[in-house]
Amino acid sequence: MMGDAPVMAHLPTLMVHILGGSIGILFGYAAVLAAKGERFHRLFGKIFVAGMTMLAVAAIYLASQLTALKPMEQANIAMGFLVLYLISTSWMVVRRPPGTTGAFEQVALAVAVAVASTFVFWGVRAEAPGGYDGYAPAFYFVAGGVTGLFAAFDLRAIVKGGVEGSARIARHLVRMCTAWFVACASFFIGQQKVMPAWMHGSKVLLVLALLPLGFMLFWLIRVRLDRRFKSSPTPVTA
């Protein structure tokens, strides 16, 4: 990436993107390791949201400028919107009183449906020989399916009038960790070319990329089994 002339023409945006991603990855680890619900966890969570927002906004702008110049950029636009959607809905669930919903959730549902539909449309186009914009159909269909699943949960929450208890915490946790996973996978797997040659293909990088999903699974099980999470009016994760 660093030697790519079209990308280097947008160096300030690229630096914002890298900075936001670095903040998101580092403070994602800090947030999941800090005592849940305590001061540092809330602080790290806020910094994580700020970093991920920088990452996504810069990615959307950068990819929109590069779409006509290089392949594999259209998907970055959609992924940027997906990350913004995940971060904002994760943040809102801990800001909104339990068991309530509003216009924000309806707009978020519309965004999720639009992103999921776009991925599926690109997946159909990728069925042609050679794929579409550098990706095979599987990538688009998996991304579209995951986004569609989040949209289905949004619709369910709107119909029920909101979420509370352990479901509220799980909603926050899954969305935060999924966005964090996107950032980790994009860096540790997708950007190995900027790392020393001896690190290329390292299993350590794969583990670092998948670790957010491991933390997510651990906390989902913990939330499921711990009664405190089921009855607490205030989310333990923030």
Image: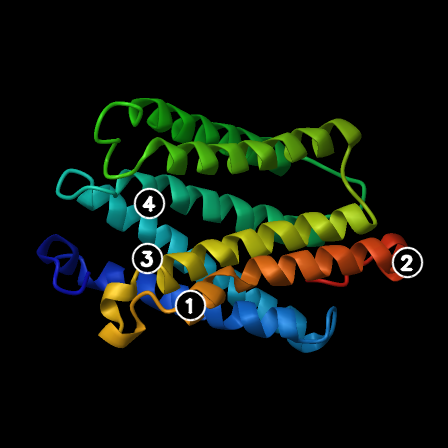
Label number found at residue 76: 4
Mark closest to the chain's N terminus, 3 or 4: 4
From the viewer's perspective, is 172 left or right of 148? right
Identify the residue under disc 3: 190
Mark closest to the chain's N terminus, 1 or 2: 1
Q: Amino acid at mark 1?
A: Lys
From the viewer's perspective, is 30 left or right of 78? right
The mark lying in front, picked from 2 and 3, is 3
Identify the residue under disc 2: 227
Q: Position of residue 176 (x, y in %)?
A: 58, 55
Identify the residue under disc 1: 203
Regarding residue 233, the answer to whether it shows in the image is: no
The mark lying in front, picked from 3 and 4, is 3
Q: Amino acid at mark 4?
A: Asn
* Crowd band around label 3 with a 10 angstrom C-alpha radius: few (<14), some (14–19), many (20+): few
Q: Is residue 82 above or below residue 157?
A: below
Which quarter of the figure is the N terminus placed in?
Answer: bottom left
The answer to whether mark 1 and mark 3 are in CB contact below 8 A is no
The mark lying in front, picked from 1 and 2, is 1
**Which residue appears at 66% of the width and 55% of the height?**
173
Residue 38 location, quadrant: bottom right
